[in-house]
Amino acid sequence: MGTTEAQVEELIAQMTPAEKAGQLTQYFYFGLPAGAETEPALGLDVERHPRMVESVLQEGGAGSLLFVTDPTEINRLQRLAVEGHRLGIPLLFGFDVVHGLRTILPVPIAMAASWDPGLIERAQSVAAREARAVGIHWAFAPMVDIARDPRWGRIVEGAGEDPYLGAAVAVAQVRGFQGREPGAPGRIIAGPKHLAGYGAALGGRDYDEVSLSDSDLWNVYFPPFEAAVDAGAGNVMTAYMSLNGIPATGNRWLLTDVLRDAWGFEGFVVSDANAVRNLVTHGFAADPSDAAARAIGAGVDMEMAIVDPAYEHLPEALESGATTQQAVDASVRRVLEAKIRMGLFDTPYVEEDHAREVLTDPAHREVARVAAERAAVLLRNEGGLLPLDGDKLGSIAVIGPLADSKRDTLGPWVFDHDLDETVTVLEGIRARAGEGLRVAHARGVRVVQRVFPSMFDMFGGNAPDDPEGFDEEAEFKRAVDLARGAEVAVVVVGEWQNMIGEAASRSSLELPGRQLELVQAVVGTGTPVVLLVMNGRPLDLRWAVEHVPAILDIWYPGTRGGAAVANLLFGDVSPGGKLPFTWPRTVGQVPMVYAHTRSHEPENQPRRYWDESSTPLFPFGHGLSYGRFEYADLAVDQPAIVTTGTVTVSVEVTNTADREADEVVQLYLHQRHGAASRPVRELKGFRRVTLAAGESRTVRFRVGPKERRYWNAAVRDWVTDSSSFDVWVGADSTAPLATVFEVKAE
Ligand code: NOJ
């Protein structure tokens, strides 16, 4: 027995059933700002909650805390657990390190739009370094849920609609958080979430139920999870909703048969917040004790709880025989092993000076800037309006309520950010413009408040600031006048960050408030307009696509967002990001994915609606550049292979422009016939390349059995058909350049 195992067994032998239940319980600990109100949705008593958690720690009643980010606080609470209880078992501190801790990176959907796994890994390693320095050991990230309905607010936290891109982004994030393995110095445990299918919530309504076919699960929703597990993720989080009628948090098939038995997951599973208790709410468990027994039986090692954890009832479930000693010990073992791996028994505390140093590391801000530059997607650039020529331009009007909002620039899911460090679009343009260029700003329209308060409002500074006495009519006119008098108008539109994220779904994809009207009035002045879109989901830009020459999607670009945007606008770097989702024209087309099957009368596919085309506004993988790329000489090294064989596909890509730029070369595959009808195209390879002016490069991809296999719902297994396969390589999912190869039975 190695030291780890021996230590673990020794501890387990000393623990009472209540202490074991405690190890398996994770509490929120909120250090809320003074005067914060009790948040009814969370059912917390702000005054009493911290005291309650502190006494629980001294009774050995918690194995982990979440939501503490201050190193002094973390040390104080850790001391209560280590020195305040006879067993002295250190706490694991978890947190939503979704896209940065102090240095805020672009939101996850934006990082996915970079199609750059190396960058994503580097970015999340910065997040990990900051988190670890303050004493956080574990990120509730990456969110690897496939999202095919942009009404769902959490689309912003994932990598979009595609399982292949999603899997690549998941792996990059796991490596970024964890390094080589859980426990690597300066890194934290990654917790891919939410197993599984959460993104398919009915109607895009958060937390709503999910029904997914076997084929959808295995071919679309599972692959990013399996890839994250393969990459060594130390934790997995369950999902809130029911999947095909069984709540995910009580679903033994999902958490044991699939996760552990099929994928070989060896880490620990945590429930989403209150999801174990909620097995009762779902009408699944009879009471909290039944919920605890069934969750642990399904494979939930640790319960994330706000108040009244169901796992408090584990001792009674043990006594009644509803659960077994063996099941409880197995979960405790996994949690203790994670603590040993993280070195917590040797070094439970953090050095606060070191934390301060890490949090102010300027190299981290640089990574955030580069990430924001590489994430941006140039949706449209008629007449080459972009890049702007900073030497020739005399005046710019920067318009829109999001142009100078620090909080919105950061996006949702940040709590420990530094607003002083945050560069807005206006500030970025001002800093880049220098002396000769006049930059004027008007908000133009007022902010739009949510219909319901956000659950994050309790942290303060979450809702958009709505200046008192704001005269919208006067401000609207001032914005239009500024635009009229300027040589170029840069209009920033989108959604306030609190309109997207958890519990922030929308029934419409329209620009909120009077933003469209503002764009129309500015375009009406005749001044050339560059539209910057700040978003985490596709928005209805049908009018803009007809009337605005340049549209750049900047997402919620993070701490150095404004600096990145200025570099893109003035051409210091070329946009090279690509859409990680299909961009519908209107909400009525949702869901719309590029990887659909041909179905009946495919020639009528673009005309399926009476009142709107059924093509998207922008296809999956779309994104323009200041470079100009030509694709030629697409070839397959062998015309025919056997089912276990692999072909190498090559293509020559040339940048015919007179400047350096990036292109994401994408490979799509289609199986013509076989034991199932397969999608018209599926992404099966991509590479982001930087090409100098005039440079050509041969890019190669391997297409083997792994790229061709699929889950067949009739035989309920993986299948590799012999068939003809079409291959396209190009700039997006509509790439025309094609070839074909044959796969024959052995
Ligand atoms: C609920 C969310 O669904 C989950 O993603 C998050 O990690 C936890 N709350 C903790 O904040």
Image (cartoon, helix red, strand yellow):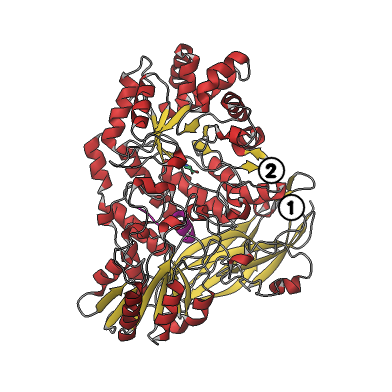
Say whether mark 1 is within 8 Å of ligand 1: no
In the rendered image, residue 56, in percent from the top left (x then y), is placed at: 39, 23
Q: Nearer the viewer, residue 265 or 142?
A: 142
Crowd around label 2: few <14 · some 14–19 · many ≥20 (10 Å): some
Please give the residue where the numbered disc 1 appears in the rendered image: 643
With 715 as the anchor, is 152 left or right in this view?
Answer: left
- Marks 2,1: beta carbons within 8 A: no
Q: Callout 2, which amino acid?
A: Asn
**CA gap, disc 2 and disc 1:** 33 Å
In the rendered image, residue 461, in percent from the top left (x then y), is placed at: 33, 52
With 722 as the anchor, is 230 left or right in this view?
Answer: left
Tell me if residue 425 is in the magenta stretch.
no
Crowd around label 1: few <14 · some 14–19 · many ≥20 (10 Å): some
Residue in view at x 79 percent, y 47 percent: 714
**Residue 674 seen anywhere in this rendered image of the structure:** yes
In the rendered image, residue 517, in percent from the top left (x then y), is placed at: 45, 76
Q: Nearer the viewer, residue 738 or 169?
A: 169
In the rendered image, residue 507, in percent from the top left (x then y), is placed at: 56, 60
Q: Which mark is residue 617?
A: none
Examine the rendered structure and indicate whether residue 405 appears above or below residue 78.
Answer: below
Examine the rendered structure and indicate whether residue 568 appears above or below residue 71.
Answer: below
Q: Which residues are magenta?
A: 104-115
Task: Please tell me in which quadrant of the rendered image residue 42 appears.
Answer: top left
**Residue 349 seen anywhere in this rendered image of the structure:** no
Please give the residue where the numbered disc 2 appears in the rendered image: 244
Q: Nearer the viewer, residue 122 or 1?
A: 122
Q: Callout 1, which amino acid?
A: Thr
Q: Considering only order in the chain, which callout, 1 or 2, is on the residue closer to the N terminus?
A: 2
State the SS at label 1: loop
With 726 as the anchor, is 559 left or right in this view?
Answer: left
